[in-house]
Amino acid sequence: MRSNPSDYEMIAPGSLHAIVSLLAKEPGEWLPLAGGTDLMVQYAAGKLPPRKLISIWNLPELRRIEVTPNVLQIGAGCTYTDVRSHEVVAREFPLLAGAARWTGGIANQNRGTIGGNIVNASPAADSLPALLAYEAELVLVSVRGERKLPYVSFHTGYKQTLLAPDELIQTVCLQRRYSRYFSHARKVGARNAQAISKVCIAGLGRMANGVVEDIRVALGSVAPVPLRLTKTEQVVKGQTVDAALMTLAKKTTMAEIRPIDDIRSTARYRSEVAGNLVVEFLNRLNSQPAERALDYG
Amino acid sequence: MNDSCERAAKAEISFTVNGEAKSIRAYPMERLLDVLRLEFGLTGAKEGCGEGECGSCSILMDGALVNSCLVPVLHAAGTSIATIEGLAVEDQLHALQEAFLQCGGAQCGICTPGMILAASHLLQTKAEPTTEEIREGLSGNLCRCTGYSQILEAVMEASRRRAVA
């Protein structure tokens, strides 16, 4: 049953200050709506309970990308198109540019925003493992001021986050220190465009003197939240990549994740694929001839 | 008010559609797709899935391809909207429309307006796209008739026509 538009008040104050002021005045009353690629789907399906919506779409304060010598700051209101077409993102953060390219079709990339994707908190979102691998930080804003926190701590459970009712995500901050890392991403789904992943991986790594000097790996759709594989990273770091290490990495991965059965796949399949994706990443990392190589297959 | 939820008020919303200034009173959360079809009689944009998966409601908003089923009409305020109805200039079809006809890129026609607008959006940024780029540019538009080959050919044909025009 479709929702009735007369049940939904919606305003577009047009400035960040006006929006956070209203969120502070009536906390929990207003639901922020950016590009609508999630909320409008719920709305059309009659699954968005009648409520008051506040538009944060196309706010100048949230839709800019700033580059400083050490940090890339992506406004939370930037669309996937904004993100993937930015030169620094494309050059230094290929996992994010690639995930933006995989998220929906072009029309959804023109409307879906990086902040919306984070707040929507789907464990299956393609861009979120990339943010975990790059150790992104988030700046949250409210009338009380700004606070910065590591993205890895933001999701506290299925669709649960640390965002307070009066806060918005303002910026996603990425340290510009990964240009010499090997990066690898893969999405396993029914189809590349539009299909939601059964499992996806984002990995960064660096070899030195025949051992894994540094590694960051994150998976989507294998737990209630996008998951960084810290235990698997620990067993791999400092080691030579051989058959024994790959067996251990796969086993550790499969023990670390908590996949479920759902409409897209089964826990058993996801578990096996997740382990194999980590092994594939290690294999490719290990076989890199050049010190800097990008792999986006 | 007897309802626990406050009912919305209609707002005055203005934008241009295919170059013509329009102003309507609408609930802010009305879908742009419904406004185009029901208020303006522009039925080229179709409702397929209603959830942003199939692309049959594709339109251009300030030049950007969007699914009009996912756009609350308030977001169209102040923008310039282009629909399939605005593509031909009087009796002269757009190169893409000619190419779709020539190559058999349309059968039942439900996806065609969205396909053509997605292709037009692609050709704006890449005048001579590769097959891979066409596949990506149209990846959000589903067709259940043609098998896509004729659509790809049509976009390549339109790109060639524009190159020689």
Image (cartoon, rainbow, N blue to C red):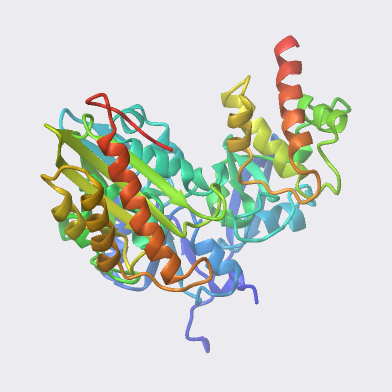
Instruction: Give the residue drawn at x 58%, y 34%.
Output: B63
Q: Position of residue A159 (x, y in %)?
A: 35, 69
Would residue A221 be found to the left or right of residue B114 on screen? left
Q: Position of residue B65 (x, y in %)?
A: 59, 40
Furthest residue in direction bottom, as rendered? B2
Instruction: Give the residue drawn at x 74%, y 53%.
Output: B46
Question: Where on the picture, by quarter, is residue B164?
Answer: top right
Instruction: Give the residue drawn at x 41%, y 36%.
Output: A84
Question: Where on the picture, by quarter, is residue B61?
Answer: top right
Q: Evaluate whether residue A234 shows in this view.
A: yes
Which residue is more in the foreground, A92 or A24?
Answer: A92
Would residue B31 be found to the left or right of residue A166 on screen? right
Q: Evaluate whether residue A75 shows in this view.
A: no
Q: Is residue B30 above or below residue A84?
A: below
Q: Is residue A11 above or below residue B153?
A: below
Q: Position of residue A147 (x, y in %)?
A: 15, 55
Q: Is residue B91 above or below residue A271?
A: above
Q: Position of residue A251 (x, y in %)?
A: 26, 62
Furthest residue in direction front, as rendered? A243
Q: How many marks?
A: 0
Which residue is more in the foreground, A256 or B38?
Answer: A256
Q: Quadrant of the C terminus of chain B?
A: top right
